[in-house]
Image: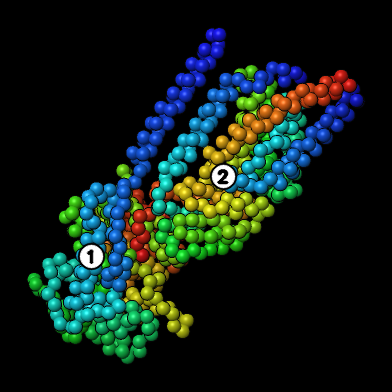
Amino acid sequence: MKKSKKSKIIISTVAVIAVIALAVVGFFVYKNKMPYEEKSAIGFTMGSVVTVKSFGNKNADSVEKDVVDALESYGSSLSDKAFDSSCLSSKFNGDSQAFDADEIEAISKAKEIYSKTDGKAALTVGALSSLWNFNSGKNTVPEKEKIEAALKLVDDENIIINSDGISVSGGSILDVGSIGKGFACDRAAKMLDENGIENAVVAVGGSIYAKGHTAPGRTIRVGIRNPFGNENEYLGYIPTDNAFISTSGNYEKVFEKDGKKYHHLLDCTTGYPVEGELVSVTVICDNGAKSDALSTACFVMGYGNEVLKLLKEENAQAVFVFSNMDVITTPGLVNSFHLTDNSFTWTYV
Amino acid sequence: MDVRMKIRFIKKADVIIIAVLLLIAAVLLLTKFLNTDNKLTARVIRNGEVVETIDLSQVEKGYTIDLGNAKIMVEKNCISFADADCPDKLCVKCGRLTHAGDTAVCVPTRTVITVSGSKKTVDVISY
Amino acid sequence: MKKSISKKVAVFGIMGALALSLSFLESLLPALPFLPPGAKPGLANIVTMFAACTLGLPAAIYIAVLKAFFALVTRGVTAFFMSLCGGILSAVAMYILFRFNDKIGLIGISVISALMHNFGQLIVSFFLVGSAAVFGYAPFLIVFGIISGILTGIIFKILLPAVNKIEINTQKGG
C-alpha cells in the first residue's frame, strides 16, 4: 500500500516538474528567439531593385512603401539633373544643375576621396562610362582612339562646387553612378529616422543601410556576396545595428569579347576596366555615399598600404576578396566579420 | 543463470525513464519548430567543412549542385539530395528539407545538408 | 562436457542465423515517410537480449559483431562501422542492465538498449561526416527507439517461456 502511494507521488511530481520546465523553456524561447514582424516593400530605381524592410514596426501605415516611392522619384529626378552611368538612360541634357546641400556634400566627399586614387577613379568619368555604356547591353569594346579622346575629358579639377550648385568645365561630364545608390541609402535612412523606425534594412542594388535588430539581441546581418557563386550565395556576414555598406565587384555588369572579360569598374588613367587580383571590395562606414565612393576607390586602387590608409582616414572598414579566394578584412572587423564559407581563407590586417 | 527470474516486465523506473526521454525529445522538437520562418539557409557540409551556404529564401530558379559523388537539388525554400554514390540512398529517401533543423546525411560520401532558420541567415546581401 | 560445448555451439549458431535473417527481413521493409530512413524495429535485438540475458556478454557481443559483418557484406563499410558501434554499445548496456540492476524492468532495458544502438550509430556518423548536424535526427530517433524498444520487449516477454526451455536443455545435457 505504502509503496504504490509513494510511486504515485513520485510520478505525479515528475509530471508537474516536466510541465513547468516545458512552460519555462517555451517562454524563454518565445521571448528571445521570436523575430520581430517584418514588413517590406520593393521598387526599382537607378537601374536596380530597391528593397525596404522594417522589423517590429507596429504602425499601421506603410512607411516602407513610402520610402520606396521616395527613392524611385528621387532616382528619376536625379537622372534629370545628372548623368548616371548606372541607369539605362539618363535624361540629363548636359546643363549644370542645382543640387541640394546633401547632394553637394556627398559629391564633394566623393571628389575628395577620388583625389586620393592617383587619378584612377573620378567623378568626371562620364565621357568614358557613356562610351563603354555597360547598361545598354550592346557590349562592345570602344575603339582605342575614342577611349583616348574620352580620357582627356576625365578630370575632377573641372568640377566647381558652389554653395548652391555644381558646375563642370572643360567639357567634362559628371557621373554620379558610383555614388548614387549609396546616396539613396542616406536619404532612406533619414526618412526612416523621421518616421521613428528603429529597425530596418534598405537595399538599393548592392548598397545597404542596416539599422537596429531583427529579434531581441539580434542585430542586422549583412552578408557579403560570394563573387564566384550566384546572387543568393554569401561567403560571410557582418552583424551591425547601424552602418552603410557598399560593394564594388568585377562580377557585375561584365561581358566577354574575344576571350577577354570587361567589367564596369573603369581605371580612369587607362580608360579600360581595372585589372588585378581583387574580385570585390565591401566597405562599411557611417555614410552611404561615402561607402559607395570608397568601395569604388578601393577597387581601382587595389589592395595595399595606400588603400588601408585611406580607409583609416575615413573611419571605414573593408572586406577585400581576391581571385584566389583569399579574404582580407581591416582590423576593425576582427570581432564582427563571420566567415561562413570555408572554401575562402580569411585573414585580417 | 536465472536472471530472467529476477527481471520484472515493467517497473516504475521504466515509466520514469520513458517519460523523461519523451520530454527530451519533445523539447528538441519544440525548439526546431519554433524556428519556423521564411528565412531559411541551407548549408552543404563535406568532410566537416561547410562548402556551400545558400539563402534558400532568395532562390528563384531551381538548380543542381554537383559534388562528384553527390548531387544536390536547390529550390526556393527547399533543398534535397538528388542522388549520391552510396548503396542505401538513405539520404535521397530523406526527401525535401523544408524546415529549420531539417537534415539529410549521406555517411558514405561524407555529405550533410542542413537547413537552419533565422539564427544563421543573413538579412541582406551586399554585392 | 563435450556435449555441453557442442550444444552451446549449436545454440550460438542458431541464434546467429536467427539474428541475421531477422535483420534481412527488416531491411526489406520500406522507409516510412515520417521516420528517418533506415530506422528499423530492430527485431534482431530480441536475439541479442536473449544472449545478454542468459549466455553472457561474449555471446551478446558475438551477435552484434555478426550483424555488423552482415551489414558490411550487404551495405558497405560505412554500414559496418555504424552497426558495429551501435550493436556493441547496445549489447554492453543490455548485459549490464540484466546482470547488475534490479530497478529497471524488461521494457526499460529494451528501450535503453535500442537507444544505445541509435546513439552508437549517431556517434559514428558524426565522426565520419564531421558535422554535428547529424544530431538533428536525435528527437526522431529517441521516439522511434522508445517505440521499437517497447515492441521488442513485449515480444521477448512473450517468447520467454519457450526460450527457457532451450537453456534448461543445454545445462542439463552437459
Q: Is residue A67 above or below residue A7?
A: below
Choose top left, top right, bottom left or bottom right for residue B8: top right
Q: Where, quadrant-wise, is the N terminus of chain A in this rendering?
A: top right
Where residue C34 is drawn, which disc sits there?
A: 2
Where residue A2 is drawn, which disc sits there?
A: none
Is A25 left, or right, of C105 in this rendering? left
Q: Is residue C126 above or below residue B60?
A: above
Callout 1: chain: A
Is A319 left, or right, of C110 in this rendering? left
Determine the residue positioned at 71% across, 28% down: C156
**In the displayed image of the protein, which residue is found farthest to the right?**
C2
**In the displayed image of the protein, which residue is found farthest to the top?**
A1
Determine the residue positioned at 87% across, 19% down: C172
Q: Amino acid at mark 2?
A: Phe
Question: Is residue B58 in sight in this rendering?
Answer: yes
Structure colour scheme: rainbow
Question: How dense is the environment of label 1, judged by Cα within 10 Å: few (below 14), some, or many (20 and up)?
Answer: some
Residue nearest the observer in this picture, A61 or B35: A61
Q: x, y percentage for residue B78?
A: 49, 56
Contact flag, marks 2 and 1 (Cβ < 8 Å):
no
Q: x, y percentage for residue A66?
A: 22, 61
Q: Which element is circle 1 on?
A: helix
The residue identified by callout 1 is A69
Choose top left, top right, bottom left or bottom right for residue A85: bottom left
Question: How dense is the environment of label 2, judged by Cα within 10 Å: few (below 14), some, or many (20 and up)?
Answer: few
Q: x, y percentage for residue A254?
A: 39, 76
Question: Is residue A110 in sight in this rendering?
Answer: no
Q: Amino acid at mark 1?
A: Asp
Residue nearest the observer in this picture, A263 or A320: A263
Is A121 left, or right, of C60 in this rendering? left
Q: Which element is circle 2 on?
A: loop
